[in-house]
Image (spheres, rainbow, N blue to C red):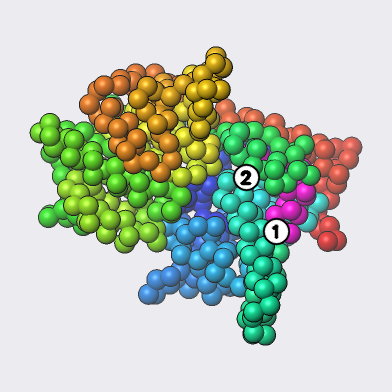
Amino acid sequence: MKILQVTGFPNNGAGSGTLITTQAEDFVKHNHEVCTILSENRTDFPRVPGVKYHLIPFTAETENPEKIDGQLEFNFPMFTTHTRSTSTFWNLNLDEIKAIEEKYREAIQEEIDSFKPDVIHGQHNWIHNAIATEFGLPVIVTIHGTDLMGYRRSLEELQNIKNQLDSGNLTIDEQNALRAQADKYFYFIEQAKKSAEGSQRVIVISEDQKQQFCELFPEAEDKVVLVKNGYNPEKFHVMDHVDKDALFDSLSSDRSADGKLPKDYDKMALFVGKFADFKGIDVLIDATKKNEEEAEKKGETLLTVIVGTGALEPDLKAQAERLGLKNLHFVGLQGPDVIRQLQNLADLSVVPSRNEPFGLVVIEGTACGHPVVATNSGGIPDIMNTTGKTIKQNYDPAVDGNDPTVLAPNPGTKGTYTTDLGMLVPVDDSEELSNAMMQIIDGDVKFDNQAIAEYTERTYSQEAINGVLLSLFSKAIEECPQKSDGKKLKLTRNPQ
């Protein structure tokens, strides 16, 4: 099968990029052909051998950005900031957005003519996937969560602008500026609708996401299919040995006297992710203050390592300094080989997100054989809940206490749950987060690390999940209106 992946973002530095790379690796391994259209500001981005790449070129926010033929004069936009871009859809104007649209339209047409895909797999229910629906090919779109956040924000911004215009207290220039903004948000809304309505299947990656999508796009509810994300067991797995000295010597930290990670510690907690507000890193830093104090009372050292980067980095480092944290270190953006070694050394991973659409880093951590402490939000409970019962975000003892299908939170907590894979804690609660982390660190709650790793591979291996995707692709190809009697797909664009 020939699969055209279309993403509006890079294939690295964020969860959706990691996911499509993992999918592409397994597709190629099983003799399928893959072409990926992606946004980038450099030509030396990570590539999967055997995958064809079509770059939509942007300009990096560096002193001497790479010169790329045809590049747009601004950086690639995201819903939230990326590790290599502070540009977002919200700070671009409509002309810039439409310039991106035309780049993608040209790229998709070029790959339809040259690569001749059987199916298009779009990433995010947004502009680039809306364009993909114009060509008469079967399109399946995967929702990643930030696209739903973007749609909600567009609706809210449009309503806010309407309220301001209705106030009658604006100058002509102010009114014109607001109308220009309204045009942009209306465009976002229309493109998201076009994407949802034009796709033959809509993949959601969690039950929470399914509910959100159906509320926002009820006309596409019958297209929704739940397919959880997967990971590559060749990249994330339990290692027989990690050379800690060599690994730590290869990393740097500006929060230590010698610029290196300290090697003398008792336990280690790990965070991996981009520095965006919804990731909740500030909550982890607050919890680390209490963790360090508790460890110090026992004469122990708890090392907290934070992997990643982003626009919030100065604020997060300032927070750590203000709290006087001694053993928390930022080690920057790292590749999967380094992350796998850190995960094998770590006693637990922490995912303190305020709203995590899925939580790929959860299964990457459990694949390396340790428990995860994560928030009870978004798609995370779908992964973490191995209890066979329902875990609610707001447990009501008067109602839920009599329901045998609902799991009660741990006694004495404000909503913390223990499962076979780790612990779930309430969102934005540094005290509950700290308590859960320290229960694992101190051994008060024990886990079977080997069983955690085996369960993860059995449940989330990309090879098994790609089998589901390929089945969906095949059905979409059969059902595509442009295909009949097994004949080759018509490759001309629909007149829209």
Residue 297: x and y in percent read 12, 34
Residue found at x 39% / y 18%? 451
Residue found at x 50% / y 42%? 356
In this image, 260 relative to 316: left or right?
Answer: left
In this image, 188 relative to 341: left or right?
Answer: right
Is residue 248 or residue 124 the one in the foreground? 124
| Predominant SS along the magenta part | helix
For mark 1, give the secondary structure: helix
Distance between the alpha carbons at the discs numbered 2 and 1? 15 Å
| Residue situated furthest bottom in the rendering | 172
Q: Please name the residue that numbered disc 2 is placed on.
A: 143
| Residue situated furthest left in the rendering | 299
Residue 358: x and y in percent read 52, 39
The crowd level at tag 2 (other Cα within 10 Å; few <14, some 14-19, many 20+) is: many
Residue 259: x and y in percent read 17, 55
Which quarter of the image is occupied by the C terminus? bottom right
Q: Please name the residue that numbered disc 1 is placed on.
A: 189
Hey, which quadrant is residue 475 in on the image? top right
The crowd level at tag 1 (other Cα within 10 Å; few <14, some 14-19, many 20+) is: many
For the image, the number of numbered tags is 2
For mark 2, give the secondary structure: loop
Is residue 469 or residue 363 the one in the foreground? 363
Q: Amino acid at mark 2?
A: Ile
Q: Is residue 463 above or below residue 431?
A: above
Highlighted range, magenta = 189-204
Hey, which quadrant is residue 435 in on the image? top left
Which quarter of the image is occupied by the N terminus? top right
Residue found at x 43% / y 40%? 427
Is residue 346 or residue 399 the one in the foreground? 399
Name the disc covering residue 295, or none: none
Residue found at x 74% / y 53%? 193
Is residue 288 shown to the viewer in this render? yes
